[in-house]
């Protein structure tokens, strides 16, 4: 479904990514774990065309999308929920959702999609006329996810969805991820909460300073002693 | 239903506005009519700056420059041939402009288009950088335009300025343009472009992830804004009848910024009301610049005292009510 080969990203003189290869099959949850600054977010942003790629290739459904602008990538069915939620605080919940559908032209389709999102997150419906800035952290994360779903994406990329949320809400977020997955979406998840991420992932990659050091099915990595030591905080 | 009501209300507002203008146009004396005209022009100018600075969240300080382009274009294109000869006595006007005499509307459009073109030419390279650079570039641009207009004597008559510009601006022109601008802004902001501008102001990264092209939208907003500033400048030239490069100093930009901030960044209604209030207050507070006799003591007039008052109001608003005086929650 989504294939990334030999991806390099440079910021100034710093090589943030040095040859990343990722392969995602349809209807999988794939996660990317690693420490701060390992290059997880950069990978997502490079795939979305938000940062420049120094080298490498991104293929989606067998089609080369390496050099497409973000709006065309979104149109093809890949969308990213940015890190830190980043809802448009001064706009209402509904306006946020409408903006999510920016690349869509069909007005009635957009209306129907908003209804779908409200069915999925009744809390958002209750607050549809409220400014997004007045929502709680968990609700803002729901809104950020809902906004991304407005384009009916096939591949949903999420950048640290559980960041800064209370443990109960973290559970909710992972439940939402599973629910979206069960509706047939392919998900690329970047997380610091490695345990939770590995538990739901079909396949996982471990990033360290811009390079992949380990990969394998989620439950296998959960058992891996290196992963346990470095990311799950369990002693040998 | 709601949409329908809104439409009805807007229509009633429009009719009331036109009726009020019609009456005012009859009863007011020349001086007051001029203030009324200025109100209309400042509504257009306030909205044009609000589009750039308020709705899209860019920081432009070049309004005086774009207005100068509009004003000079209208002045040169509409001025009768014999007036041109009288104006350009130091140095004759360049031949290709000497025999031109356009009517007001095409000249005004040309003023807007040229201002918009310059907006595009500045915006296209600068808006690729972060917003701070736009402030610096536009500030510099406005000053450059002023200096260029002062020195291109065979086109602009330099520091002598231009006199006898046909007084084409009347209440219907200034307010007609203002009303069209308000309608344009309402439609723009309701539509997907307006929403995208808002999104960019709120959060660039999120907007970009939604597939909104930051650069195109910023350039578009800035070019629209410059176009409207040029139109406003053109109306002003045809109202005052005389212009010179020193009119278009940074103070002029500051006046418009005052309107935008007082009315509330990103508020159409706010800009309209505050444009009217500020324009009237600018005249009403003129006594501050003159000597004041309190009977027992006479205070010497200080030129520019008005602006001190306005600056204080502006500071107060920024500190205590950043969303603007008129913006409802």
Image (cartoon, coloured by chain):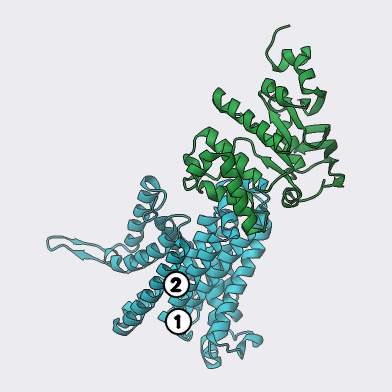
Chain colours: A green, B cyan
* Position above or below: B151 against A213: below
**Marks 2 & 1, CB-CB < 8 Å contact:** yes
Tell me if mark 1 has few (under 14), some (14-19) or many (20+) residues whose alpha carbon lies within 10 angstroms of its own.
Answer: many
Q: Position of residue B161 (x, y in %)?
A: 50, 78
Q: Position of residue A113 (x, y in %)?
A: 62, 49
Marks 2 and 1, the one that precedes in the sequence: 2
Along the line of sight, the residue nearer the viewer: A84 or B244: A84
Badge 1 element: loop
Chain assignment, label 1: B
Residue at position x 53%, y 33% from top? A137
Q: Is residue A199 above or below residue B229?
A: above
Please give the chain letter of the residue carrying mark 2: B
* Residue at image mark 1: B169
Q: Is residue B107 above or below residue A218?
A: below
Circle 2 SS class: helix
Q: How many marks?
A: 2
Occupied quadrant, residue B239: bottom left
* Image quadrant occupied by the N terminus of chain B: bottom left
B323 or B233: nearer the viewer: B323
Residue toward you, A146 or A64: A146
Q: On the picture, is A112 further left or further right than B265?
A: right
Give the crowd class for mark 2: few <14, some 14-19, many >=20 residues within 10 Å: many
Residue B150 visible somewhere in the drawing = no
Q: Which residue position holds label 2?
A: B41
User: Which residue occupies 72% across, 15% down?
Assistant: A230
- Is residue A76 shown above or below A203? below
Residue at the far bottom: name it: B82
| Residue A96 visible in the displayed image | yes
- Same chain under badges 2 and 1? The reply is yes
Q: Which mark is residue B114?
A: none
The residue lying at 66 percent from left, 50 percent from top is B129
**Which image quarter: residue B144?**
bottom right
């Amino acid at each position: 479904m989504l294939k990334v080969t030999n991806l390099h990203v440079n910021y100034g003189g710093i090589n943030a990514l040095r040859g990343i290869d990722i392969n995602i099959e349809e209807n999988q949850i794939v996660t990317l774990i690693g420490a701060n600054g390992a290059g997880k977010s950069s990978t997502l942003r490079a795939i979305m065309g938000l940062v420049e790629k120094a080298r490498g290739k991104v293929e989606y459904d067998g089609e080369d999308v390496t050099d497409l602008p973000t709006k065309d990538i979104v149109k093809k069915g890949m969308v990213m929920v940015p890190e830190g939620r980043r809802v448009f605080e001064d706009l209402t919940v509904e306006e946020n959702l409408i903006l999510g559908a920016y690349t869509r032209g069909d007005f009635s389709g957009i209306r129907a999609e908003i209804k779908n999102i409200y069915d999925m997150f009744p809390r958002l419906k209750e607050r549809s006329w409220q400014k997004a800035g007045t929502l709680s952290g968990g609700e803002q994360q729901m809104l950020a996810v809902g906004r991304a779903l407005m384009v009916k994406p096939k591949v949903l990329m999420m950048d640290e969805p559980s960041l800064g949320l209370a443990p109960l809400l973290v559970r909710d977020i992972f439940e939402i991820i599973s629910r979206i997955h069960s509706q047939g979406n392919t998900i690329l998840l970047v997380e610091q909460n490695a345990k939770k991420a590995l538990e739901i992932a079909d396949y996982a990659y471990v990033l360290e300073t811009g390079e992949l050091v380990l990969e394998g099915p989620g439950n296998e990595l959960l058992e891996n002693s290196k992963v346990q030591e470095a990311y799950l905080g369990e002693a040998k | 239903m709601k949409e329908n009501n809104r439409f009805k209300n807007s229509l009633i507002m429009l009719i009331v506005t036109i009726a009020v203008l019609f009456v005012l146009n009859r009863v007011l004396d020349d001086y007051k009519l001029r203030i009324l005209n200025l109100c209309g022009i400042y509504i257009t100018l306030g909205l044009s700056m609000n589009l750039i600075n308020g709705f899209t969240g860019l920081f432009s300080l070049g309004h005086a420059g774009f207005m100068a382009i509009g004003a000079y274009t209208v002045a040169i294109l509409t001025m009768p041939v014999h007036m041109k000869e009288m104006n350009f006595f130091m140095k004759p006007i360049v031949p290709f402009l000497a025999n031109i005499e356009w009517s007001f509307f095409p000249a005004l459009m040309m003023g807007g288009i040229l201002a918009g073109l310059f907006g595009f030419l500045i915006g296209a390279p600068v808006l690729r950088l972060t917003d701070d650079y736009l402030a610096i570039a536009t500030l510099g641009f406005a000053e450059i335009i002023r200096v260029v207009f002062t020195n291109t004597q065979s086109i602009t008559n330099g520091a002598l300025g231009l006199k006898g510009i046909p007084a084409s601006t009347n209440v219907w022109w200034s307010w007609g343009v203002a009303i069209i601008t308000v309608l344009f802004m309402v439609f723009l902001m309701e539509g997907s472009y307006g929403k995208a501008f808002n999104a960019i102001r709120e959060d660039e990264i999120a907007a970009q992830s939604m597939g909104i092209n930051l650069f195109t939208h910023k350039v578009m907003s800035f070019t629209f804004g410059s176009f409207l500033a040029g139109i406003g400048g053109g109306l002003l030239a045809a109202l005052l009848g005389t212009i010179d490069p020193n009119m278009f100093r940074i103070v002029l930009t500051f006046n418009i910024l005052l309107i935008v901030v007082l009315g509330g960044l990103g508020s159409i209604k706010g800009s309209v009301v505050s444009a009217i209030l500020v324009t009237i207050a600018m005249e009403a507070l003129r006594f501050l610049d003159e000597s004041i006799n309190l009977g027992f003591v006479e205070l010497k007039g200080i030129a520019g005292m008005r602006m001190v008052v306005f600056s204080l109001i502006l500071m107060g608003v920024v500190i205590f009510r950043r969303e603007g005086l008129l913006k409802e929650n």
